[in-house]
Image: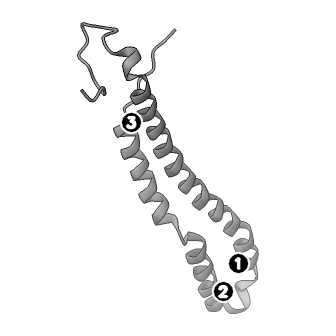
Amino acid sequence: MDELEANPWQGYSKGEVAEGLAQAMVGLDDDFDQLITRIMSAAGDASSGYSGFRSEVKPELEIIQTNGLNLAEDTQSGAAEIAKADYEAEDVYRGAWPDIPEVNFGN
């Protein structure tokens, strides 16, 4: 069986980065809506195509926002689960490999 390793602190840090990106995307659909409204106002009679464009794009922007928030939450939750598994298994693996220094065992 192949081994898999994970660093919960790096994972949580990446989750914080994803959270920052997700926060930056909050309101993206509203900003888009305001932009299209201003464009339609300036376009006058030529604004008819913008309404359809808004209807097509706005739901996609809402999905992007939701996916960004889910990514941040899932990344941080995964890191927390890894840390929890390490903590719960520390007694099982303590001393299993005597030549390897102990890591994540909170001596």
Say left or right for 1 vs 102.
right
Q: Residue at x 54, y 56 (%)?
A: 69
Cα separation, mark 1 vs mark 2, equals 7 Å
Disc 3 target residue = 8
- Tag 2: amino acid: Met
Disc 1 target residue = 50
Estimate the x, y position of residue 96 in percent, counting from the top left.
34, 9
Cα separation, mark 3 vs mark 2, equals 48 Å
Camera-nearest label, 3 or 1: 3
Q: How many residues crowd mark 1 within 10 Å: few (<14), some (14–19), many (20+)? A: some
Q: How many residues crowd mark 2 within 10 Å: few (<14), some (14–19), many (20+)? A: some
**Tags 3 and 1 in contact by the CB under 8 Å rule?**
no
Q: Give the SS element for disc 3.
A: helix
Image quadrant where residue 105 sits: top left
Image vertical order of residue 63 relative to residue 36, above or below: above
Cα separation, mark 3 vs mark 1, equals 46 Å
